[in-house]
Amino acid sequence: MNNFNAQKPGMISLLKRLVEIESPSHDKAAVDRVGALVAEECRRLGAQVEIHPQAGTGDHVLARFPKPRPLSQGKRGKSGILLLSHMDTVFPLGTLEKMPFCEKGDKIFGPGVLDMKGGIIIALTTLAALRETGSLPPRPISALFTSDEEIGSCTSRALIEGLAKGSALVLVLESGLPNGAVKTWRKGVGDFTVRVKGRAAHAGGDHEKGRNAIEELAHQVLVIQKLTDYEKGTTLNVGMIRGGTATNVVPAEAMAEVDLRVMQPSEAERILARLHALKPVLEGTSIEVTGELNRPPMPFDERMKATFERAKEIAVKRGISLQAGGSGGASDANFVAPLGIPVLDGLGAIGEDYHSEHEYILTDSLPERALLLAALLCEW
Ligand SMILES: [Zn+2]
């Protein structure tokens, strides 16, 4: 297969159908409508489809593609390749009215075109083409379409990890970088809440009896921000603070919400230890820290280097020069990397401005990425 240009119009029309079914993570019925379309497409491609029902979020859809008869002794018994995509978006219902699916010049705009309905189309189209031409590789191929990636993958994490463990390679169809690079590292992400307790008192009559929780929190905010180490790729962001009840009351409570990003597992340990060891500066106040690392980091380590180099060699044979990049944002690839399974992310569409009203993809990236995915599936 030399290119997917003939498939381009079909890709665009299927993408339009998918984008016009809005699917915010918190709306189960909405995400299930996308799930129904994805399941139908997979069944049409001869896949065995398993629905993993969820109560609070959309159901996850797992499609197992039939393995052609092994071509040779050597290729028999190869473990499988897992494709990962998510069906939910960050856009609430009704977004389409002000941000409709539209093709303009060499771009396509619409909620979720880049993150990551374009990636779903690339996966489905590639598998369809390989099946039609009888070139599906003689190994199990499965595709998992999840419903809750944008809200932390709480209900899909175990499923992702379970499937990844038996795989030779996991390919994630999140968007590629604007220059076409795939994502070979991603930071890990943690969310923490720092609660400070003081003592309430009348701000005029009993000021000295009070213990000001906001003042204490102010000390802690400075300590937390200073844990940032740009050289190591570690950042802490106190993104929200709340506290107090009225200006004439010494505040008894205050809290801060903190976003943590780390490049290295060791940094996660260091910061967690520091956060849990925070000590109050003002006598009579106390601090409680809750939270955890939701997604471990996916570092550009030796394994990732080897995975990327192999992918690069495969790509170059199809005339594609593959570049390596990364992102401070996390994805489901972050769950796969610590398992020691080769994983490559950012194989989806190419574009910019995801999670914003300007989100777009480059239309030609649909067939281009399908070609890359086909190469990886066939030659890994
Ligand atoms: Zn995404």
Image (tube, rainbow, N blue to C red):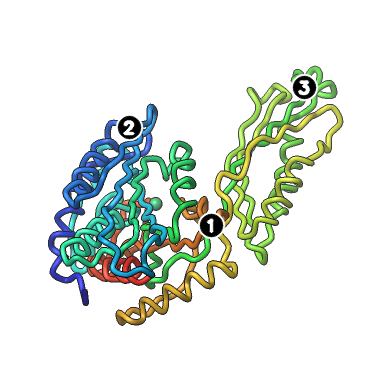
Residue picked out by circle 1 = 337
Residue picked out by circle 2 = 28
Contact between marks 2 and 1 (CB within 8 A): the answer is no
Task: Determine crowd level at label 1: few under 14, some 14-19, many 20+ residues with C-alpha closer than 10 A.
Answer: many
Q: Amino acid at mark 1?
A: Ala
Say the numbered circle drawn on residue 199. 3
Q: Amino acid at mark 2?
A: Lys
Q: Is residue 253 left or right of residue 18?
A: right
Q: Is residue 175 left or right of residue 370?
A: right
Going from N to C along the chain, the mark reached first, 2 or 3, is 2
Task: Determine crowd level at label 3: few under 14, some 14-19, many 20+ residues with C-alpha closer than 10 A.
Answer: some
Q: Is residue 363 above or below residue 124?
A: below
> Is residue 152 among the parts visible in the rendering?
no
Going from N to C along the chain, the mark reached first, 2 or 1, is 2
The verdict on label 1 being within 8 Å of ligand 1 is no
Q: CA distance from mark 2 to mark 1?
A: 28 Å
Residue 58 in the image, given as x and y percentages of width and height: 34, 35
- Determine the residue positioned at 86% across, 31% down: 283
Q: Is residue 354 left or right of residue 297?
A: left
Viewer-proximal residue among 155 and 50? 50
Residue 314 picture quarter: bottom left
Residue 199 picture quarter: top right
Going from N to C along the chain, the mark reached first, 1 or 3, is 3
Quadrant of image for the C terminus: bottom left
Contact between marks 2 and 3 (CB within 8 A): the answer is no
Viewer-proximal residue among 159 and 324? 159
